[in-house]
Structure formats: structure tokens, C-alpha cells
Image (cartoon, rainbow, N blue to C red):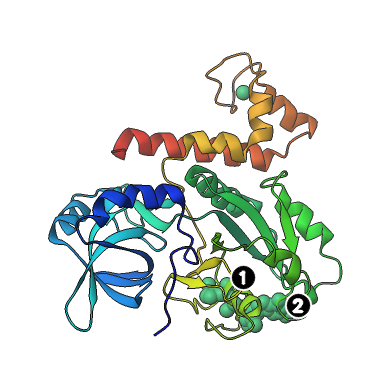
Amino acid sequence: MVEFDLETLGLRPETRAAFQPLARHGLELGRISTTHRKGGVLLCPRGRLQVAVLHKVRKRQEAGELEAHLTVGDWVAFEPRGEPITALVHEILPRHSLFVRKAAGLRPEPQPMAANVDHAFIVVGLDSEPSPRRLERFLTMVHRAGARASFVFTKADLVEDPSKLIEENLEAGPATPYFVVSSETGLGLDTLALEIGPGVTIALLGISGAGKSTLVNALFGETMMQTGAVRGRDQKGRHTTSERQLLVVPTGGLIIDGPGIREIEPWDAEDALEETFEDVAEWAAHCRFSNCRHDTEPGCAVLDAAKRGALTDERRRAFVALRLEAEQRSKKGRR
Ligand SMILES: Nc1nc2c(ncn2[C@@H]2O[C@H](COP(=O)(O)OP(=O)(O)OP(=O)(O)O)[C@@H](O)[C@H]2O)c(=O)[nH]1
Ligand SMILES: [Mg+2]
Ligand SMILES: [Zn+2]
């Protein structure tokens, strides 16, 4: 069985410190690699273990406690039990970042997607139409989580000159660092790999067919994940990856790959919007009314900027819409 030492798995001093009192009770540390309804799999110095969850943790989950909701990337304190050993989770340790979206369905409920991520790669296939509105949503979720964000423009081998597509996508986050790569030819992969240093946890976000799993395989130099062709007609992916999974990169670092995401509603992200829409926020500081909605108000500096063409009206409207979404949710369902 492959064993994983805790540093390889990305353990931080603050997590180790939080675990210290639990170690005295004979509990051990592990990191969640996958989850399913009843448990999942974790990685630890013993190897790869099946996970079960203590009744009291299950109860907290059922009560909707986000802190108790087992998530890929979580650090947990577990009791090794039985033969073969199952990891019985007693505690989920405090997270330094957490990606949360609004769950599908009518009731506003948070759905955690990945925990303890340092850096999100927002993967965009250069064979698809620019989608700054979608990228704004990804960025906002990452900012809310407290992780770094970069764009990874992939499939560079399929386009002659990607500069226009890149520029249009960068409207979503003009200051966001970006990489141009091809998993096919290897272009840019060395530079990208430098971001995946020892102990660093990367999460891949992007629509189905963007090329996330192909990128994982190219970075690993072997087939870790299944990949699937996009449909010719509409360039849509086929949801090849169905499960989110934390993988240990042989040269150091960790990558979380998962199913493609088309629409995302970031959770509890009112403040994070200011970070994604830094340009809008700067204009907004000059509006006549401090509670300006930037929609129809007189003396609105954001509307002015859009009229002058200093800002696209699509981006202004995207900001207005995301803020409204966030506010409506915080009225209805924030815990
Ligand atoms: N030419 C070229 N094709 C690529 C590249 N990266 C990915 N592809 C192709 O794009 C298709 C989709 O790739 P996947 O890696 O399965 O996409 P994904 O983002 O993991 O998709 P889901 O798992 O459905 O979310 C496959 O046919 C890949 O071969 C690239 O750099 N160049
Ligand atoms: Mg995939
Ligand atoms: Zn305004």
C-alpha cells in the first residue's frame, strides 16, 4: 500500500496544532480524497483508508452545519477501527479555505466543494467561446474561499492566435494571473508546474470538456483521470469526470479534479464581489449615493463609466445581478 506522509499531503502547522489535543485520545490525522453519501476515502501515513463518520458528526451534518460537512481536501481526526481498518471520523479540523456554492434546488443551501485549497486553476479551453460572465462567478467563489486564483487557458495547440480570446476572458478579472498551455504539445506545462510546489493544493475549476483531466494527466505524465472527447456539434463536454478527487502529484503538491461546472452561484459572497469587480468598485466610490445600485440612479459613476465605454455594460450588469443574488440569499437563508 502506498503511504503518504503528512507533509506530502500538505499539512500546515496550524492544522497540526489544532489536532494536537485530539492526538492524546489516540486519534490520527488524514486528508479526505473523495467523499460519497456515507463516507469516502482518506489518505494518511497508513495509506488509503475507507472513511466512516461518527454518529455525532453525522447529526451535525444533518443539522446543516457546514463545518461538519465532509469535503474533499478536509483534514480529519479519525479513529482507526476494525480489520481491514476503516477511518472513523471524529472531527473535521478548521479549514483555511472552503469553496462553497449554492446547492441546486429551490431552498438556498450551501454546498461545500473543496476544502483547504491554496490556489484555484480556472481552466478554459481555447476552443470555446469566451465566457467572462461565467469566469466572474468562479473567481468570486475562489475569492470568497480565501484562495488564490489563476486562469489556465488550455488547448493552445488548437488556435493560431489565442490573444483575442484571452483578452475577452480576462475582462472577468483583469488582474488575475494567467497561463497558456497545451496538454497535447506540452506548451507551458513546465511553468505551470512551478505553481504546484510541495504541499500546495490546487483545485481545477471549469466546464465539462475544458480539459481539466487531460491537464492532470499531462502534469502527472500518466493517466490518472479518464478524459472524454467533446461533442463535435456544440463543443459541449460529456461530464467524463463524475467524482471530485484529491490526487498526490509525484513531484510534490496536490491537485483536486472534479466534474465540470457550468453554472455556479457563489455562496455568501457579497464582500468577495468587491474583489472580483475591483474596477467597478473603484468607479462606485464616486457615485453620488453611497447605497447606489448602479442601475438607474442619478449621479452614478459606474453607469457613467459604462456609457463612456471605460467599462462594458455587460460587466456592470453582471455585477448588479450577482450582488442582487447575494443579497436575496442573505435575506432568505443565511445561517
Ligand atoms: N488538442 C487538444 N485537446 C485537448 C487538450 N486538453 C484536452 N483536450 C481534449 O478535450 C477533451 C476534453 O478533455 P477532458 O480533460 O476530458 O475535459 P474535462 O475538463 O476533464 O471534462 P469533464 O471531466 O467532463 O469535466 C478531450 O477530448 C481531450 O483530449 C489540449 O491541450 N489540446
Ligand atoms: Mg474530467
Ligand atoms: Zn452607482
Q: Quadrant of the C terminus?
A: top left
In terms of image quadrants, where is residue 120?
bottom right
Tell me whether circle 2 and circle 1 mark residues in contact (CB < 8 Å): no
Residue 56 position within the rendered picture, expressed as x and y whole percent measured from the top left: 14, 55
Q: Earlier in the sequence, mark 2 or mark 1?
A: 2
Specify whether residue 232 is in view: no
Of helix, strand and loop, which one carries label 1? loop
Residue at position x 48%, y 77% from top? 241
Relative to 151, say whether 40 is above or below: below
Residue at position x 23%, y 78% from top? 85
In terms of image quadrants, where is residue 229?
bottom right
The residue tagged 1 is 210
Left or right: residue 50 versus residue 120 is: left
Q: Which of these two is toward me, 40 or 258?
A: 40
Q: Residues within 10 Å of mark 1 (few under 14, many from 20)?
A: many
Residue at position x 72%, y 32% from top? 306
Q: Is mark 1 within 8 Å of ligand 1?
A: yes
Residue 40 position within the rendered picture, expressed as x and y whole percent measured from the top left: 30, 72
Left or right: residue 144 versus residue 21 is: right
Residue at the limit of the structure toward the top, as seen here? 288
Residue at position x 23%, y 75% from top? 86
Q: Which of these two is toward me, 50 or 241?
A: 50
Front tag of 2 and 1: 2
Residue 225 position within the rendered picture, expressed as x and y whole percent measured from the top left: 52, 81
Relative to 183, say whether 142 is above or below: above
Hey, what amino acid is under mark 2? Gly
Specify whether residue 178 is in view: yes
Q: Which of these two is toward me, 304 or 182?
A: 182
Of helix, strand and loop, which one carries label 2? loop
The residue tagged 2 is 186
